[in-house]
Amino acid sequence: MPIMEQTERKSKRKEQLSPAAQTLMNEITQTKRSLDAARDYFEYVTDPELVSSCIFEMKALQLRYSHLLHLLREEMRTCQL
């Protein structure tokens, strides 16, 4: 499938989401970017304290990501009723 068609499909799906679901999607996207950045930084640091800090940050972001996905699933379920 061409990239343009994929992009159009994604934007149409996003337009169909409730405002709350769109907000959650934006939060999930931002959290995913932060998690990716934390993983990249973890690969770069060598100081033991920074390594520990990165581990705690990644764990917190993973928990936030999971929580936001749960909220989005619940929002999608209630919108379909």
Image (cartoon, grey):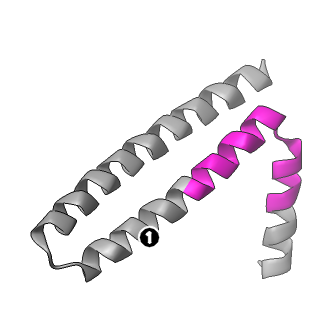
Tell me: residue 21, above or below residue 61: above
Q: Is 65 left, or right, of 56 in this rendering?
A: right
Q: Is 64 left, or right, of 75 in this rendering?
A: left
Tell me: residue 11, above or below residue 7: above
Q: Which residue occupies 53% across, 54% down?
A: 31
Tell me where residue 81 appears, x and y as whole percent: 78, 17
Quadrant the N terminus occupies: bottom right
Secondary structure found at label 1 = helix
Q: Main secondary structure of the magenta part?
A: helix
Region in magenta: 10-30
- The residue tagged 1 is 37
Tell me where residue 17 appears, x and y as whole percent: 82, 40
Tell me: residue 72, above or below residue 29: above
Q: Quadrant of residue 49?
A: bottom left
Task: In the displayed orientation, state which residue is furthest to the top.
Answer: 81
51 or 22: nearer the viewer: 51
Magenta stretch: residue 19 in it? Answer: yes
Q: Is 15 left, or right, of 81 in this rendering?
A: right
Number of marks in picture: 1
